[in-house]
Amino acid sequence: MMEPAILVATWGDGLFAVTGDGRTQEIAKQPVRGLAADGRGGALAIVGGHSLRRRAPSGEWATVATSEFELSCCMAVRDAIYVGTDDARMLRLSHGGGVLDPIDGFDSVAGRDAWFAGSAIVNGQRLGPPLGIRSVAANSNGTVLFANVHVGGIPRSVDGGRTWQPTIDINSDVHEVRAHHADPDIVAAASAIGLCISRDAGATWTIERDNLHASYCSAVAFSGDDILISASTDHFAAQGRVYRRPIRPDGEIVAVEDGLPAWIDGIADTGCIATNGSTIAVVDRAGTLYLSTEFGLAWSRGSIELPAPSSVLIC
């Protein structure tokens, strides 16, 4: 069985493909973010802020489209690619035309005028990202789309992106949304107030925080029958922890162990937990990569430290 390649995008030093104890730099000296599967065995990424690129299964990268907008995240849904921006716009690329067209319906989401940029005061300075789309997701059959606005909740669309409706209190301060790979009704989100779970395709949400050492959650993913969630005291915390919760309604949140450190170095931020089949990759703020090929029942630590990561994907 071929060993999976772990793609790690970084905020300033390009993108690395990690296999075993080695790494190859496939993109250099540029910010890369928003890694996502392309639905064809390859990957998508935002490069340099304005370029949407696709990685072929062979490892070759090609530009799919460019935009005047500052791009933040992307996803492939059937024959379309949806791209979020740092000023909270939604764009769509259809039929490989090379043009990212704005989706006008996203600009008229109810409650949009109450969205705001998340920030914090650190050492007397206000720090934080702009108001923008932090992550996007689609349910397993592609009928419902989700956009995680920071800070603006999780608007969803049930008509292919033409219209959008708000779903969760914007003050939940959501940092990532993910949909289950097989059940179209199950969606999870990482928020500043805990783990958010929907069992009706994002129409309603419940918030869980019992057993978390802190409620500030940054990354979320599905692995087998579990939801994985990272938590810390805040975005700038010196350490974080990864937890799991069974998808079934009566499950409880417990810390992931079995070789994963109780505390990772800094947080595992948005996009920094990836899964593919039985394989899980977690990368912390320090660039340490942790890998499990057994649904998290055993873990190994990469021997190579990576530059500050923005996202991770398993190919």
Image (cartoon, rainbow, N blue to C red):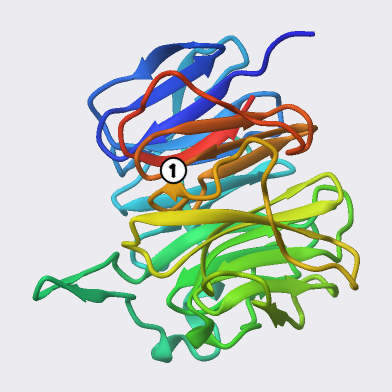
Which quarter of the image is occupied by the C terminus? top right
Q: Position of residue 299 (x, y in %)?
A: 65, 31
Q: How many marks?
A: 1
* 231 relative to 311, above or below: below
Where, by quadrant of the figure, is residue 147 drawn? bottom right
Q: Position of residue 262 (x, y in %)?
A: 55, 49
Name the residue beneath numbered marker 1. Answer: 284
For the point 57% across and 88% down, the residue is 169
* Neighbour tally class for label 1: few under 14, some 14-19, many 20 plus, Cα within 10 Å: many
For the point 74% across and 68% down, the residue is 159
Q: Nearer the viewer, residue 224 or 143?
A: 224
* 189 relative to 66, above or below: below
* 76 relative to 116, above or below: above
Which quarter of the image is occupied by the N terminus? top right
Residue 247 falls left or right of residue 148: right
Q: Nearer the viewer, residue 29 or 288?
A: 288
For the point 46% across and 56% down, the residue is 240
Residue 301 falls left or right of residue 163: left
Q: Nearer the viewer, residue 179 or 264?
A: 264
Callout 1 amino acid: Asp
Q: Position of residue 43 (x, y in %)?
A: 58, 29
Where, by quadrant of the figure, is residue 124 drawn? bottom left
Q: Position of residue 313 (x, y in %)?
A: 57, 34
Asked whether the viewer can see residue 104, the reply is: no
Asked whether the viewer can see residue 82, the reply is: yes
For the point 41% across and 84% down, the residue is 115
